[in-house]
């Protein structure tokens, strides 16, 4: 194997286009930086891109999860009701359930797909269960047919966390339209980014209305496009509640402060215009690395692409398999010393995240999630990388294994 010069492979990147920069300049000069016409523009662009009827932008992916769940209070849910989520995810999935006022109930994941195991869901359902929140972890779609069938049988909502799944498709459909509401992150390392931010898609106008209310403290003012915010015009609905009752200061429900601002939306608008370019490049990188990974069997594994799906190319998961003569720390240290950024592949939220100790789960309750939490990492596949960088990643891993197998 040829000796290679050490390269630098950062985990993520952000593409801020010239259009975004020009829009940000205009926004700053207008002195109108709070949520307004550019947020509305971004929402419409996102909805059209993914084929959703409605998209509601918020301030983070965590808020996207929390607000989507909080919508359920308008449709019969009560505080303390239960939401089923996978044990393995970024901790924000569990945090969002609690922030929305619900109780997270965890189900183990499959070591191969990294997603919730549908056959274990029904055992977790009780009379207080209101929704299932599957996570399309690492952009790989969960088994939505099985999950939707279970939800239909028990009259539950399905609200996927698609934080990492921009561009993912399930049986010919963008995952943005597979569920009652779908929550995305727009964080800096993701395929579509606003720097910080999140967005929720839905086909239901009543859900979208409640989402718009929730992101702004539960206000009664929840039009799709507010003339006050977007055009500074008179609103004929402003005093519909009667004398001395301004709709902007009527609060119909317990809400959040979770609006996206105009500058964030400007970054997203620019991203939307190069979305296909970003998606294609990242997917090319991911699928190339996945194909090369077969050579590392039986020591390392990654996810597989099924014929009826497209993976949202967020990152490349790497799972240590069996009982090799090395551990995750050794693999991580070697990759980092050779310039390849790594991230652990999250943790079992209920048993490996101390903040969730109050739920009284114990190690061993979620063996697959716990295994991944101790034996897996992920690395970047972003649009600034190419075949040269991907080959460097593969060659570096190959050198590591030659020294430790």
Image (cartoon, rainbow, N blue to C red):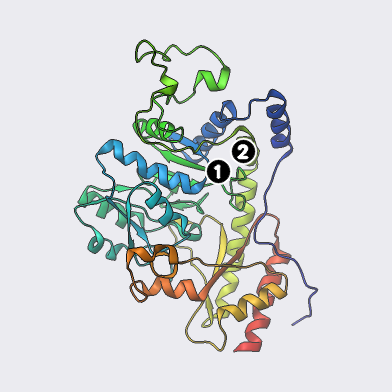
Q: Quadrant of the C terminus?
A: bottom right
Which percent across, then down, holds residue 92? 46, 55
Task: Tell me: residue 326, above or below residue 66.
Answer: below
Quarter where residue 288 is shown: bottom right
Residue at which label 1 appears: 197
Which percent across, then down, holds residue 247? 41, 19
> Of all residues shown, which one is farthest toward the front?
244
* Crowding near the residue tagged with mark 1, few <14, some 14–19, many ≥20 C-alpha atoms within 10 Å: many
Task: Tell me: residue 360, above or below residue 322.
Answer: above
Q: How many marks?
A: 2
Q: Which mark is residue 241?
A: none
Q: Quadrant of the N terminus?
A: bottom right
Residue drawn 38% across and 66% down? 357
Residue in the foreground of this view, choosing between 308 and 128? 128
Question: Residue 78 vs residue 243: left or right?
Answer: left
Residue in the foreground of this view, choosing between 170 and 334? 334
Secondary structure at badge 2 equals: helix
Q: Which mark is residue 264?
A: 2
* Crowding near the residue tagged with mark 2, few <14, some 14–19, many ≥20 C-alpha atoms within 10 Å: many
Residue drawn 41% across and 28% down? 219
| Sequence-first tag of 2 and 1 | 1
Task: Tell me: residue 149, above or below residue 230.
Answer: below
Question: Residue 282 vs residue 179: left or right?
Answer: right
Which percent across, then down, holds residue 375? 50, 76
Residue in the foreground of this view, choosing between 370 and 405? 370
Residue in the foreground of this view, choosing between 88 and 215? 215
Secondary structure at badge 1 equals: loop
Task: Tell me: residue 247, above or below residue 62.
Answer: above
Are the two marked residues, 2 and 1, in contact with CB atoms closer than 8 angstroms? Answer: yes
Which percent across, then down, holds residue 321? 49, 80
Mark-to-mark CA distance, 2 and 1: 7 Å
Question: Residue 17 vs residue 226: left or right?
Answer: right
């Amino acid at each position: 194997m040829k000796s290679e010069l050490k390269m630098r492979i950062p985990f993520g990147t952000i593409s801020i286009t010239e259009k975004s920069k020009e829009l940000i300049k205009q926004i700053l000069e207008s002195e109108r930086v709070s949520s307004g016409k550019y947020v509305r523009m971004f929402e419409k662009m996102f909805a059209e891109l993914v084929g959703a009827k409605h998209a509601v932008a918020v301030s983070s992916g965590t808020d996207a999860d929390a607000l989507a769940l909080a919508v359920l209070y308008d449709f019969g849910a009560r505080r303390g009701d239960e939401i089923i989520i996978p044990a393995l995810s970024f901790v924000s999935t569990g945090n969002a359930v609690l922030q929305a006022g619900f109780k997270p109930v965890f189900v183990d994941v499959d070591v191969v797909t990294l997603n919730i195991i549908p056959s274990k869901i029904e055992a977790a359902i009780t009379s207080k269960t209101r929704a299932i929140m599957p996570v399309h972890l690492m952009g790989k779609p969960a088994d939505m047919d099985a999950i939707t069938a279970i939800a239909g049988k028990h009259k539950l909502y399905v609200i996927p966390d698609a934080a990492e799944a921009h561009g993912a498709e399930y049986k010919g459909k963008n995952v943005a339209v597979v569920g009652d509401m779908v929550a995305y992150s727009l964080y800096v390392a993701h395929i579509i980014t606003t720097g910080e931010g999140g967005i929720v898609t839905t086909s239901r106008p009543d859900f979208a209305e409640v989402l718009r209310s929730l992101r702004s403290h539960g206000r009664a003012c929840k039009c799709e496009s507010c003339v006050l915010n977007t055009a500074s015009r008179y609103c004929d609905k402003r005093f519909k509640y009667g004398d001395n009752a301004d709709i902007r200061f009527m609060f119909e429900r317990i809400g959040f402060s979770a609006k996206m601002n105009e500058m964030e939306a400007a970054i997203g608008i620019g991203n939307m215009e190069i979305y296909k370019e970003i998606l294609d490049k990242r997917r090319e990188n991911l699928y190339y690395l996945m194909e090369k990974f077969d050579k590392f069997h039986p020591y390392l594994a990654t996810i597989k692409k099924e014929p009826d799906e497209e993976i949202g190319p967020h990152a490349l998961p790497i799972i240590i398999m069996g009982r090799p003569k090395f551990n995750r720390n050794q693999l991580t240290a070697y990759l980092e010393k050779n310039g390849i950024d790594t991230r652990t592949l999250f943790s079992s939220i209920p048993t490996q995240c101390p903040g969730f100790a109050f739920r009284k789960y114990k190690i061993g309750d979620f063996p697959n999630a716990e295994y991944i939490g101790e034996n897996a990492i992920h690395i970047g596949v972003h649009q600034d990388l190419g075949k040269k960088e991907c080959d460097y990643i593969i060659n570096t891993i190959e050198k590591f294994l030659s020294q430790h197998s």
